[in-house]
Amino acid sequence: MEYQGHEFDDRLTLVDHPMVQHKVSILRNKDTGTKQFRELVRELALFEGYEATRDFPLEPVEVDTPLERCTCQQVAGKKVAIVPILRAGLGMVDGILDLIPSARVGHIGMYRDPETHEPHEYYCKLPPDVAHRTCLIVDPMLATGGSATAAIDYLRKAGVSDIRLLVLIAAPEGIKAVLDHDDKVRVFTCAIDRQLNESAYILPGLGDAGDRIFGTK
Ligand code: PRP
Ligand code: URA
């Protein structure tokens, strides 16, 4: 996929529906308060979840409507784990659970060192059968890609084969880092931004997603 002078592998999907773009604009605004920010992150995660599950297989099911019996379609036994990268990823979990209520939730605790920008793992807990599940890693921000690649490695070591990374805003550097690091992962984002600044924050971005979700700044 070509986007504003960048060439990306076609494992990248840009979720650029007009309503998604509209809501991302509100999310970016520095005057958007914590409550609305949190609601928008949840809602965007739900929209993105639709795209990330577009290829799920279906099977026929017989349904009795009030008028007659008909053959409909249902998702064919796909098992899913949602894996938020703490903290900010937590803001996307409920939106995906609205879409896939039967999903299990695993957690990967990771923070970026403010100086080196390297990820540090501090807590991980995955469902016991995670290797047999499609894993949707969720995190609003993909900056250098350090946190996402560490999370992907953790899931690969746990035996997961189907990994999809869902972010809301991504820097070109982070997308390339993730797609180059793992040759199977698929990446979904609602926006591709210009660049990182010297502190590895995304420009124009939305600031610190964790602080804005949890009101810690
Ligand atoms: C943010 C964000 C990602 C990471 C992205 O988390 O939520 O996890 O940075 O940056 P990267 O692509 O360069 O790794 P942060 O480390 O600030 O932790 P927090 O969610 O606890 O605020
Ligand atoms: N983490 C954030 O929350 N925002 C950025 O711009 C980069 C990393």
Image (cartoon, rainbow, N blue to C red):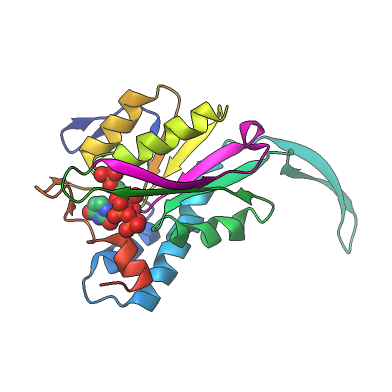
- Residue sitting farthest toward the top: 183
Residue 53, horizontal then vertical, whole percent: 56, 42
Q: Residue at x 43, y 59 (%)?
A: 44
Q: The N terminus lies in which quarter of the figure? A: top left
- Residue 141 can be seen, yes or no: no
Q: Residue at x 69, y 52 (%)?
A: 102
Q: Is residue 45 visible?
A: yes
Q: In the image, is residue 137 part of the stretch drawn in magenta?
A: yes
Residue that appears at 54% across and 62% down: 94
Q: Is residue 174 above or below residue 214?
A: above
Residue 77 drawn above or below residue 37: above
Of the pair 118 and 54, the residue shown nearer to us: 118
Q: Is residue 18 left or right of residue 96?
A: left
Residue furthest front as drawn: 122
In magenta segment, residue 140: yes
Left or right? Give the position of 186 relative to 116.
right
Q: Is residue 23 above or below residue 180?
A: below
The mark total stands at: 0
* Residue 36 on image: x %, y %: 38, 75
Q: Quadrant of residue 28?
A: bottom left
Q: Which segment did they paint magenta?
A: 118-143
Residue furthest to the left in view is: 198
Q: Residue at x 34, y 25 (%)?
A: 181
Q: Identify the image quadrant of residue 207.
A: bottom left
Q: Quadrant of the C terminus?
A: bottom left
Q: Position of residue 150 (x, y in %)?
A: 38, 35
- Picture coordinates of residue 197, whole percent (x, y): 11, 49
